[in-house]
Image: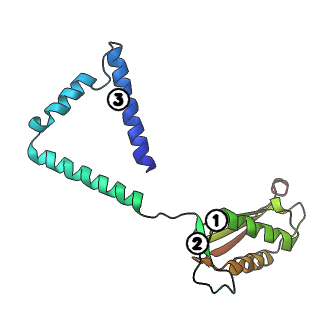
């Protein structure tokens, strides 16, 4: 959709530029408004019928594709939740990936004693990435982080299920040594 909007905006900018140049009496960049109008009016008689039909079919297919893309549901940054012990089928719980990430990061911070700003969590459609930035001299147990993360995610009952990866970054002071 973004590509289609950009193409339309560029076409409108070009048409506007040609109109302004025409009003100012300057030569056209490619095709002036009067010549373009004459070309469009004469198009049915100047172009062979086969080419007109082929162009029409291609434009119809492009339009159909754009309509399907507009109507078809996309991948939203959300997950369905089924909390442990919840057996009710008559309701749906949906959470934004950012909310899930913030909750997991908070749980990691509480359970490991790390400051909240040392924990970054990203949640994608099928993956959760945890990045820990330890303070100077702090030792990080990846297995503990993974266990806390997996336990928290399991309590949510995410659909679709996600895989967890844990990464520990080195502080810049440690890298420079």
Left or right: residue 98 compared with residue 40: right
Q: Residue at x 10, y 48 (%)?
A: 50
Q: Quadrant of residue 104?
A: bottom right
| Residue in the foreground of this view, choosing between 89 and 29 | 89
- Which element carries disc 2, helix, strand or loop? loop
Q: Residue at x 71, y 80 (%)?
A: 155
* Residue that sits furthest to the right in the current view: 137
* Residue that sits furthest to the front in the current view: 90
Residue 38 placement (x, y as % from top left): 18, 27
| Residue in the foreground of this view, choosing between 126 and 79 | 79
- Which element carries disc 3, helix, strand or loop? helix
Judging by the rendered image, the residue that carries numbered circle 1 is 97
N-term-proximal mark, 2 vs 3: 3
Left or right: residue 131 compared with residue 161: right
N-term-proximal mark, 1 vs 3: 3
Residue 100 placement (x, y as % from top left): 69, 68
Residue 126: assigned label = 2
Residue 75 placement (x, y as % from top left): 51, 64
Residue 32 in view, yes or no: no
Judging by the rendered image, the residue that carries numbered circle 3 is 15
Rendered position, 110 above or below 90: above
Label 2–label 1 contact, CB within 8 A:
no
Residue 95 in view, yes or no: yes
Q: Distance of mark 1 from mark 3, alpha carbons? A: 42 Å
N-term-proximal mark, 2 vs 1: 1
Rendered position, 139 above or below 90: above
* Residue that sits furthest to the top in the current view: 25
10 Å neighbourhood of mark 3: few (<14), some, or many (≥20)? some
């Amino acid at each position: 959709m973004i590509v289609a909007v950009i193409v339309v905006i560029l076409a409108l900018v070009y048409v506007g530029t040609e109109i302004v140049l025409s009003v100012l009496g300057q030569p056209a960049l490619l095709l002036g408004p009067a010549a373009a109008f004459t070309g469009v009016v004469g198009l049915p008689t100047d172009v062979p019928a086969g080419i007109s039909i082929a162009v029409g079919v291609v434009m119809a297919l492009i339009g159909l594709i754009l309509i399907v893309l507009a109507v078809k549901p996309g991948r939203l940054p959300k997950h369905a939740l089924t909390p442990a012990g919840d057996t009710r089928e008559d309701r749906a719980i949906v959470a934004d990936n950012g909310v899930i990430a913030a909750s997991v990061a908070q749980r990691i911070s509480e359970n490991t004693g790390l400051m909240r700003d040392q924990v970054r969590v990203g949640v994608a459609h099928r993956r959760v990435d945890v990045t820990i930035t330890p303070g100077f001299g702090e030792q990080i147990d990846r297995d503990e982080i993974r266990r806390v993360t997996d336990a928290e995610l399991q309590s949510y009952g995410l659909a679709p299920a996600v895989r967890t990866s844990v990464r520990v970054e080195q502080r810049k002071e440690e890298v420079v040594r």
